[in-house]
Image: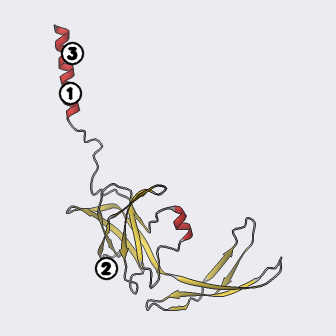
Amino acid sequence: MRNTAVLLTTLSLGAALLGVPSTAHAETCPDPADQIIAGWYLNEEMRLRDTDPFAFSPGQANLAFSHTGYCFPLTLTVERPDGSDRHLTVIDTIADGAGIGYHQFGWDRFDYASGTGPWRVTKAARDGVTVDLTTPVDFRTTRASVVTLAATPGALPSGPRVTGAVLYWTYKGVLAPSPGRTVWIASPTPGSTRSSAEH
């Protein structure tokens, strides 16, 4: 009888413990330690074949953001380092499919004429709760350049001569010469030579 009482007490205690949800691994939403990713790409292959996400042109002044946390949707505060031009952007889209995995991301639209320069993501918010990020994310946007090259026929080993021009998009949305730029031309063939030209 004594052993039975001990067994019942033990089982009751175990059931009580199992009935209490553990908070040891509870997630914070929004999480101040969430890692925000500026200039996010769906995958590495897309990043390598696409253009610089931080370089804006008249037809492309968007920047994608993602994060490593689970909180969704998530509103981010984006501002200049001095606190000016503060605005909100939302991570509100989910990509989930074969070969791409599960990702949460969103797009921020910048003003093309005045949106270049340094920026910082400082806060995250959801359901009326806003937190300061433990590690604010700094990034810089620029105006995209356009390189036009023409190669004249030539025989090895000297090879063809390549000439061209580097232009950049001004704040007015027109292409203008970009002096002082260096263009490196490299072949994907292993062991090939590399040349540069000043513009």
- Give the residue at mark 3: 7
Where residue 199 appears, x then y in whole percent? Answer: 63, 87
Where residue 166 appears, x then y in whole percent? Answer: 59, 86
- Give the residue at mark 2: 85
Residue 92 lies, with reference to residue 179, above or below; the image says above
**Which is more toward the observer, 32 or 82?**
32
User: What's the residue at 45%, 90% (across, down)?
Assistant: 173
User: What's the residue at 75%, 69% (across, down)?
Assistant: 192
Under tag 1, what secondary structure?
Answer: helix
**How far is mark 1 from mark 3, CA to CA?**
12 Å
| Residue that lies at the very extreme toward the top in this rendered image | 1
User: What's the residue at 22%, 26% (across, down)?
Assistant: 14
- Give the residue at mark 1: 15
Where residue 138 appears, x then y in whole percent? Answer: 41, 69
Which sits earlier in the primary sequence, circle 2 or circle 1?
1
Report the mark closest to the observer, 2 or 3: 3
User: What's the residue at 38%, 85% (across, down)?
Assistant: 114
